[in-house]
Image: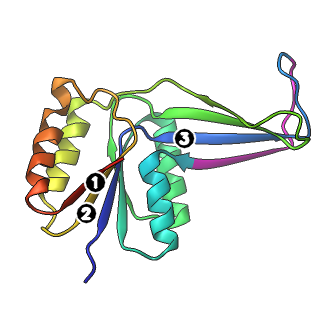
Amino acid sequence: TAPRIYTLTGNLLAERTFEFATWTPGRTQRAQAETFQVGGKGINVAKMLTRLQIPNTALAFAGGAPGAECADWLKQQGIPHRLFATAGTTRSGLVVRDRSGQHTETTLLGPDVAPDAAAVKAVAEFLAAQPDGHVLALCGSFPGWDTPAFAPLRASLEQWLGRGVLVAD
């Protein structure tokens, strides 16, 4: 069997897009359409791997109502995933699109939120329990990476190097 690719997204994004016929900054306006998707570099990789029918599992930290909305969306899209609950609320983002072509697309991102120590430990334990020979891709930024809370994950990655392929984006 082919190795499974795990993508670990350190900074999950609950992304809402508003589309306008035209918009002007500084005014109240109503969108003509609204969509939702889950973002973050590892999620984007998992979307494409799923489309290509390559065995994968998207891993990420998720918290609060935006995290629950991300879980529902991933399930609806058929993207294999495992989300690790964290006390902090998943980062939200808003994309504003102008169909008139007068303005370029604008993306507004909420603040980065570091996962709590229990969530980081849960990811480390999950990775340690996986069989040898798989691929792990660390994708995007990892808020809190240099803190003591991330020590279990850093140690797990050291072990992964001897058991599988580790790539970082």
Quadrant of residue 16 in the image? top right
For the residues labelled 1 and 3, the Cα–Cα distance comes to 24 Å
Residue 70 is left or right of residue 151, and the answer is right
Nearest to the observer: residue 11 or residue 86: 11
Question: Which residue is under mark 2?
Answer: 135
Extent of the magenta region: 27-37
Which residue type does callout 3 highlight?
A: Ala
Mark 2 or mark 3: whose residue is earlier in sequence: 3
Expressed as whole percent of the image width and height from the top left, the position of residue 101 reads 88, 41
Left or right: 137 as drawn, with respect to 76: left
Residue farthest bottom in this picture: 1
The disc at residue 63 is none
Residue 20: x %, y % from top left: 86, 39
Query: Earlier along the polypeptide chain: callout 2 or callout 1?
Result: 2
Residue 14's label in the rendered image is 3
Callout 2: 10 Å neighbours few (<14), some, many (20+)?
Answer: some
Q: Quadrant of residue 98?
A: top right
The question of residue 143 being in magenta is answered with no
Q: Are marks 2 and 1 in contact (CB under 8 Å)?
A: yes
Q: Amino acid at mark 2?
A: Val
Residue under numbered circle 1: 167
Q: Amino acid at mark 1?
A: Val
